[in-house]
């Protein structure tokens, strides 16, 4: 179908302009102050609404295959588009992990059948699949990157062999995304705390997985990247100390080392464990309030390049086990953009900056082809937002398969009213059109 979006406040590339957007053949045909409606086009009156490029989430865990009691590609992509996220990049820690090219391609096949959003999947690394990882060089135009867990993780996803790390940083032609926490420091902190107390609680999490554990690992990753001029992207930065490792002195497109911050680390602090407990247990941990202040400063001055979610759903039962058994991770992909719009309303940032960090910068960071902007000729991944339509996050509108949110009962000031993916209107006013699935992301490398 063709659409004309009329009278929208178009937020794009640092400005807000008012006008019309014509969507045709999956792409943006024309942007102008006023466009006459072709007979074949459906008109959408966007007066009073923002039109944003769809958010691109560079870090999600959709749990398929093997962990589908928590989530599936279908359920979480559906939640994503309802929250204005039109593209996602999914992590390899499924069962089995995406350690081979065949297993990686299986995930793409599933997404091609069931995902309402556009998609890409990271190749996973272990201490013994280097050869398979480096085969991804042949797919650098259609795989988002390689994921390395340089800190503790599930199964055999921890990569702690320096020879393996050296080989991958030396020979990979793709972006390398790292989870950075130092395993030895975490274990030492755990043993020390165990000598001090018998029972752990959620508030102990940032003591065990502390600032030093994050910094040591991030510093190590950067040493490897600088040795070989690798393209490194460090995920979910959480600490003040790590921020000294990143710069805003060069444009993003010239950076070889980039950094991500996640919405929960911008929103919660360690003070929130008292109320939410294990519901906000995640890796790396949510830390003391001074770190949140520093993260915001670094986001606004461009030391931190992109905003993501690290969407990681677990069942209610898995989150309500005692601390040491409770699973780490938060479901967030449906509510990340509304949460950032809350901070726009609070005066913490601007809507132009939110669009930059959740759309433009992600496309630039990963060299995504023809997405992330409202530009003629680009894919029509766009979202309409009603800034005057608040809603409360609650069980009747949470779409995650796990059916809960750490933000439950929070009132969001603005609602996503329409989501277009590749020019298809997939979400409108709480209803879904599932006749089209998303596309595999392509990269201009």
Image: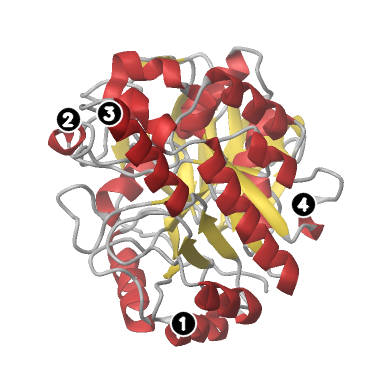
Is residue 429 shown left or right of residue 290? left
Q: Label 4: which residue? A: 252
Q: Secondary structure at mark 2?
A: loop
CA distance separating discs 2 and 4: 41 Å
Give me the disc on residue 278: 3
**Point 74% across, 61% down: residue:** 256
Give me the disc on residue 75: none
Q: Nearer the viewer, residue 238 or 75?
A: 238
Q: Are marks 1 and 3 in contact (CB under 8 Å)?
A: no
Q: Nearer the viewer, residue 160 or 317?
A: 160
| Dot in front, 4 or 3 | 3
Residue 407, image x and y in percent? Answer: 36, 22
**Point 50% across, 31% down: residue:** 265
Q: Earlier in the sequence, mark 2 or mark 1?
A: 1
Q: Earlier in the sequence, mark 4 or mark 1?
A: 1
- Bin the neighbour count of mark 4 within 10 Å (Cα to Cα): few under 14, some 14-19, many 20 and up: some
Q: Secondary structure at mark 3?
A: helix
Q: Are marks 3 and 2 in contact (CB under 8 Å)?
A: yes
Q: Secondary structure at mark 4?
A: helix
CA distance separating discs 2 and 1: 37 Å
Q: Label 2: which residue? A: 320
Residue 419 in the image: above or below residue 96: above
- Bin the neighbour count of mark 3 within 10 Å (Cα to Cα): few under 14, some 14-19, many 20 and up: many
Give me the disc on residue 130: 1
| Dot in front, 2 or 4 | 2
Q: How is the image coloured?
A: secondary structure
Residue 3, image x and y in percent? Answer: 53, 46
Query: Residue 249, located in which quarter of the rendered image?
Result: top right
């Amino acid at each position: 179908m063709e659409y004309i979006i009329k009278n929208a406040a178009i937020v794009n590339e640092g400005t807000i302009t008012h006008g019309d957007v014509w969507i045709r053949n999956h792409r943006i045909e024309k942007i102008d102050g006023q466009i006459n409606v072709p007979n074949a086009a459906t008109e959408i009156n966007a007066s009073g609404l923002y039109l944003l490029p769809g958010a691109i989430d560079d870090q999600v865990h959709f749990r398929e295959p093997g962990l589908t009691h928590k989530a599936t590609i279908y359920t979480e992509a559906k939640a994503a588009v309802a929250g204005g996220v039109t593209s996602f990049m999914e992590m390899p820690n499924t069962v089995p992990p995406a350690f081979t090219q065949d297993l990686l391609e299986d995930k793409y096949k599933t997404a091609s059948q069931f995902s309402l959003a556009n998609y890409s999947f990271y190749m996973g690394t272990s201490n013994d699949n280097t050869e398979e990882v480096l085969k991804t060089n042949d797919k650098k135009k259609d795989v988002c990157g390689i994921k390395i867990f340089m800190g503790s993780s599930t199964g055999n996803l921890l990569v702690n062999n320096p020879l393996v790390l050296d080989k991958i940083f030396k020979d990979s032609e793709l972006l390398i995304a790292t989870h950075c926490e130092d395993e030895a420091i975490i274990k030492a902190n755990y043993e020390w705390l165990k000598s001090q107390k018998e029972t752990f609680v959620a508030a102990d999490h940032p003591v065990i997985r502390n600032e030093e554990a994050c910094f040591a690992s991030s510093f190590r990753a950067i040493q490897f990247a600088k040795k070989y001029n690798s393209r490194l992207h460090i995920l979910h930065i959480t600490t003040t100390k790590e921020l000294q490792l990143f710069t805003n002195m060069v444009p993003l497109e010239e950076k070889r080392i980039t950094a991500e911050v996640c919405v929960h680390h911008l929103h919660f602090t360690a003070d929130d464990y008292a109320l939410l407990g294990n519901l906000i247990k995640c890796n790396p941990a949510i830390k003391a309030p001074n770190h949140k202040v520093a993260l915001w400063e670094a986001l606004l001055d461009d030391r931190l390049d992109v905003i993501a979610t690290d969407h990681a759903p677990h069942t209610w039962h898995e989150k309500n086990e005692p601390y040491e058994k409770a699973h780490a991770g938060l479901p967030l992909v449906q509510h990340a953009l509304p949460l950032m719009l809350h901070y726009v309303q609070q005066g913490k940032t601007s809507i132009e900056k939110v669009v930059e960090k959740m759309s433009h910068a992600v496309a630039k960071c990963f060299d995504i082809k023809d997405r992330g902007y409202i530009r003629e000729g680009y894919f029509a991944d766009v979202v309409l937002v009603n800034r005057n339509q608040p809603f409360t996050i609650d069980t009747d509108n949470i779409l995650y398969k796990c059916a809960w949110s750490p933000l439950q009962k929070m009132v969001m000031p603005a609602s996503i009213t329409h989501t277009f993916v590749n020019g298809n209107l997939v979400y409108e006013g709480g209803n879904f059109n599932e006749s089209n699935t998303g596309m595999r992301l392509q990269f201009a490398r």
